Image: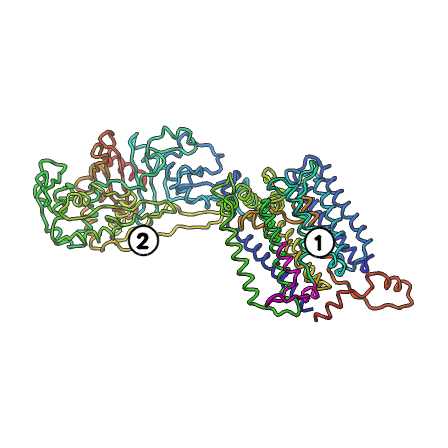
Amino acid sequence: MTENPFAYFFSCVFVLFSHAAMLVNIFYNGNYDSIKDVIILAVAIAGTDIIYFVAMLFFKQHNFTADFMLLLILNMGVIFQSCFGGVHLSVKHLITCIACLVSCRIGYILTRNHKWIQQQKKYIWLGIGILAVVILTLTGSRSMWIDLGFISIQPSEFMKPLFVLACATSVSEQQNKHKIWKFDIVWENIILFGITAGICLLQWWCRDLGSIPTFAAIYAVGFLMRICYPKAKFSNKTLLIAGGVVLLVMIVGIKFAPQYVRDRLFVDIWSDKSGNGYQQSQALIAIAEGGWFGKGPGKGFLYTVAAHESDIVFASISEEWGLLYAIMTTLVLLAINTIPLINPPRSYYHATMCTGVCAALTVQMALNIFGSCNMIPFTGVTIPFIATGGSSMVASGLMVGMIVASQSPDFQKPKSKNSKKSKKKTNSPKRKKPSGTSDRRRSA
Amino acid sequence: MKSIKRCQRIITLFLVMFIVGMTVLVLKINREAPFYMMNSDNHQLGMVYDRNGDVIFDGTGKGEYEENYFIDLGNLIGDDKGIMENTLIAQNIDKLNNYSFSEGIIREGGQASIYTTLDHYANRAVYNAYAGAEGCTVAYNYKTGEILVCTSLPSIDVTNGYANMAEMESGTLISKAMYGTVPGSTQKISTVISALEIIGSERLFAKTYTCEGKYLNKSGDYIDCHDPAGHGTLNIQQAVEKSCNPFFAQLIESEDLPLEQIIKKYRKLGYAVNDDKPEYIDIDGIQCAKASTTLTDSDDFNTQWGCIGQGSTLVSPVQLMMWQSAIANGTGKMTMPHLIDRVFNVYGDVTEIAKTSFSEKLFSEQTASTTKQIMLTNGQNNYSVSIGGYKVGVKSGTAQVKEGAEENSLLVGFLDDERHPIAFCILIENKNAVSVTTENIANVLLNALCN
């Protein structure tokens, strides 16, 4: 149960109010055939909100900020997705959102004990290996999907949270060095480099090039956290060399990229409006038509364009709700990433994990938004929690669960030992001295 | 704690980079949204008006107009279909965009518009005066630079669309006033200006040459005169009035006028001489070709022929008209022409107001004054009947085109009237096949603009 019922209550009210405001906008400005469609949507949103508010009470956390943020953004996504082309509840997206909420809980439960999760590293590597084999064998020739008929699964999405965990490290792991020739080497770092290279090659093979920057970003922050661990000297020279290598790899990658990749990279969307530049040009036109305040929910044209609900969803939202609202939605997403800044992670392992999660989520947002708006090459990556895609949703939920798990507990003043309540709390896992505090003392 | 802070710094770096990216994106969208909107099927253009508020282009497509209501200015104003590119709308389409990003798409009530300097009534009158002939007429206020008339035939009423484009005559989709044409004897004004600049008024007027119907130049080629009987002995005033080719051929050969000096003066006037890079005059985005000629040797037939206004010399009617402003103003500076007077945005606010501008000095005030007097005398002696009631300074020209198969008739000049400071250039193509004359057109033009 929460220890601050007032904060909890007002957070619930805030989330409900935000969703209600959107529903009111739909009621007045939306494009719907029958008021029944709006009511069904409202019931689904309010129902999910309230059920989750109640469900969260069964988890003993001191802080629910990330959970409220997640619920807020997920149901915003349901509302957006339910409005494209006319107001109808998007049941499929609602189900994936519920799956996301569940996976968030799973992510939290699995990673809250950093010592335990660290001990599972070999299983994490194994999991990545299994997913790689699955991609190679089950996704078909150069594809990223496993089609089960009623549902399609993108295994590479599940690789992201596993890869974040593989990149996360503790200080003790980094001090476990072996002298080989003139170098002090941490074997785990070598293995991680091999895994990264393998994943990138795999993504290249299955033409999921959009995911490569996400994996690269997770690895980059993991690498930084590994070479800059507390007792290591922060070497500018090392960083420069690493940056140079990354730049070189990018240049070589672009130079030797297949023609279809270069066509996408260097396309002039306005001179190829019906070809490679179709989605981006339509997206930008839709944003322009929407202006700051949008045409109204369900009144856009972009729903006729392929991937309007995923790859160019930012433009779809901008068109119907306005660029201002689309930016505000992005800020909510961004706010989830700021949680580790407000509530510092409680161990070095959690810190590296959080950094990886933030890198993954931010890079995915950037690739989607900037790509669809023709600022960078269009990769077809989805925005977490807003765009459709069950695999992406579950994987992103797991990653938010990691952020929840990494938050520091609130330290309460010790209460009377004689108090029954106090005794109960002392016996509960949350009342134990968090293991992360010892890490923090060491690193201070 | 230091290690946790490092994690926070990296997260902050990612977030800051993302926010910077978002800021750039918002600025980019805000700036480029009108362009995106122009690519939308839902975009709506505003109106283009003439100087009196008469519609000359309806971007809404909702107005009802008489058949061929816009034909007199169709190939100058153009439309948004992308077929004609060197037109007012094609070059200023962003100004007509009835769109504001702060409101998004506006389906009704946008007030974006362009008020031009054109006089629709005068253009229509001139267009009708051609009576089936082809050519173009351009006129402007040489004090302010406001283009009043710029009609080119054949033309198109853009509201009729382009379904019969294959059947359209050559030149239908361009405003001929903006493109180079053989200037004929109107070129002699440039040669007079150059000679005045090089040797001065007194020495030029002292020069006399004899015309016997044709002149055997120093390189052994004949320069024919349009009067086979010859004009006898002439001075510069008489040579201009008679438009005598042998006189000008001998003037070019004269040792007082070194070719380098002539080339220098021609370049000053704006000619691309020999291999000079061709340039354009920008008139509110519309590209107008600058003059070009080939001058290699004073004794050479082609050089002399070029200075007379034949051969490879090409000048656009607009530039011929602009030179008239430098003469008529008496300053030696051309008044730069413009078509757009005011631009209103989607909310009806004025965003652009035209300002009069002038070119650099092409020739001295003395040269301008002398040339002006030569042209006025020509107007008084030879055009007082055909262009009755107006004090005009003019020079006519006949240009051989299509390897001599056809002749175009030109008339450049200005009205010496403080109330109506109008400079003009009139071109009639294949003059022998039509009954209308440049003087007829000039009369209609001046009547429409002055009354």
Q: Alpha-carbon neighbours of circle 1 within 10 Å: few (<14), some, or many (≥20)?
A: many
Can you give x and y, in whole percent of width and height, for residue B61 in the image? 48, 35
- Chain assignment, label 1: A
Task: Determine which residue is flagged by label 2.
Answer: B358
Residue at horizontal 38 percent and vertical 52 percent from the top? B355
Can you give x and y, in whole percent of width and height, for residue B78 in the image? 40, 38
Can you give x and y, in whole percent of width and height, for residue A93 in the image? 70, 42
Q: Tell me if label 2 and label 1 are in contact, CB under 8 Å.
A: no
Q: Which residue type does callout 1 highlight? A: Ile
Does residue A32 appear left or right of residue A413 in this picture?
left
Can you give x and y, in whole percent of width and height, for residue A180 in the image? 62, 65
C-alpha distance separating marks 2 and 1: 77 Å
Evaluate whether residue A24 shows in this view.
Answer: no
Tell me the number on the disc at residue B126.
none
Tell me the number on the disc at residue A124.
1
In magenta segment, residue A191: yes
Range of magenta residues: A170-195
Does residue B116 appear left or right of residue B214 in this picture?
right
Does residue B248 appear left or right of residue A67 in this picture?
left
- If the image is split into quadrants, where does the C terminus of chain A sit? bottom right
Element under disc 2: strand
Q: How many marks?
A: 2
Q: Nearer the viewer, mark 2 or mark 1?
A: 1
Same chain under badges 2 and 1? The reply is: no
Is A281 or B345 nearer to us in this picture?
A: A281
Q: How is the image coloured?
A: rainbow
- Chain assignment, label 2: B
Element under disc 1: helix
In magenta segment, residue A176: yes
Residue at horizontal 41 percent and vertical 37 percent from the top? B83
Is B43 or B331 nearer to us in this picture?
A: B43
Q: Which residue type does callout 2 highlight? A: Phe
